[in-house]
Amino acid sequence: MSRHDYAGAKVAAVKLSELLPQNADSHLSLGNILYYMKDNEGSIKELEKAVALRPDFQVAQVNLGKILISLGRTAEGKAHLKRALDLNPGDEEVKKILSSLPESN
């Protein structure tokens, strides 16, 4: 698989998530691949599965929050980023993103 073979990576990640449907890491991997393939809705669906399986999965919370914010779903995204910050209070990237968002959302 080449460095940017997202289609090949997607096939492998789909198989993994089908074999291990209760594994949050497999859904995180597939969600990230779908994001790089510009399938935002598919990515959100997989990342939501990851955080449903493991609400304390900080990386999945961050990724989901960032995608939602990029799509204008700011309030939803902020909620995931705030959860991520609760899980890792020292995450400077998340602090920076949250501080750049309007308070009203």
Image: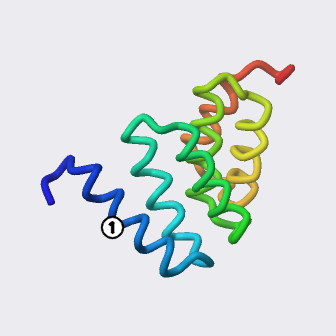
Q: Can you say which quadrant of the picture contains the N terminus? A: bottom left
Choose between 74 and 49: the one closer to the eye.
49
Judged left or right of residue 103, residue 51 is: left
Callout 1 secondary element: helix
Q: Residue furthest right?
A: 104
Residue 72 lies left or right of residue 8; in this view the side is: right
Instruction: Describe the colour scheme in one phrase.
Output: rainbow
Relative vertical location of residue 71 with respect to residue 39 in this rendering, above or below: above
What residue is at 21 percent from the left and 47 percent from the top?
A: 4
Check disc 1: other Cα within 10 Å, few if <14, some if 14-19, many if 20+: some
* Residue at 13% in and 54% down: 2
Instruction: Identify the residue position indicated by label 1 in the image.
Output: 12
99 lies above or below 91: above
In the rendered structure, which amino acid carries the disc numbered 1?
Ala
Q: Position of residue 10 (x, y in %)?
A: 35, 57
Q: Residue at x 33, y 67 (%)?
A: 12
The number of numbered discs placed on residues in the rendered structure image is 1
Q: Nearer the viewer, residue 9 or 70?
A: 9
The C terminus appears in which quarter of the rendering?
Answer: top right
Residue at figure coordinates x 61%, y 32% from the top left? 97
Q: In the rendered view, does 78 fall on the left or right side of 97?
A: right
x and y, in percent, of residue 24 in the image? 58, 70
Q: Horizontal placement of 66 versus 8: left or right?
A: right
Q: Residue furthest left?
A: 2
Examine the rendered structure and indicate whether residue 23 appears above or below residue 68.
below
On the image, the x and y values in percent for residue 103 come to: 82, 22
How far across and how far down the image is residue 35, in percent? 45, 42
As drawn, 38 above or below 90: above
Residue 71's quadrant in the figure? top right
